[in-house]
């Protein structure tokens, strides 16, 4: 059971990292669009 919980925690961490990275690229794209105007 503990190994399954550990795996779930790892997946949650990876999901959060992906979301954070996605937000970062989204913000960069918005800033880039504002600069190019």
Image (spheres, grey):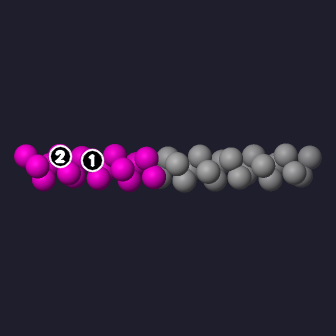
Q: Position of residue 9 (x, y in %)?
A: 73, 51
Residue 22 within the segment the image draws in magenta: yes
Q: CA distance from mark 1 to mark 2?
A: 6 Å
What is the number of the mark on residue 33? 2
Q: Main secondary structure of the magenta part?
A: helix
| Residue ID for mark 1 | 29
Part of the protein shown in magenta: 21-37
Which residue extends farthest left? 37
Which residue extends farthest right? 1
**Image side of residue 33 versus residue 22, left or right:** left
Residue 31 within the segment the image draws in magenta: yes
Q: Position of residue 6 (x, y in %)?
A: 80, 53
- Element at label 1: helix
What is the number of the mark on residue 13? none
Q: How many marks?
A: 2
Estimate how packed mark 1 is, as few (under 14), some (14 to 19) or many (20 or more) residues with alpha carbons within 10 Å. Answer: few
Tell me if label 1 and label 2 are in contact, CB under 8 Å: yes
Estimate how packed mark 2 is, as few (under 14), some (14 to 19) or many (20 or more) residues with alpha carbons within 10 Å. Answer: few
- Element at label 2: helix
Q: Position of residue 15 (x, y in %)?
A: 59, 46
């Amino acid at each position: 059971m503990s190994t399954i919980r550990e795996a779930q925690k790892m997946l949650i961490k990876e999901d959060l990292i992906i979301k954070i990275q996605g937000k970062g690229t989204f913000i960069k794209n918005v800033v880039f669009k504002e600069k190019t105007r």
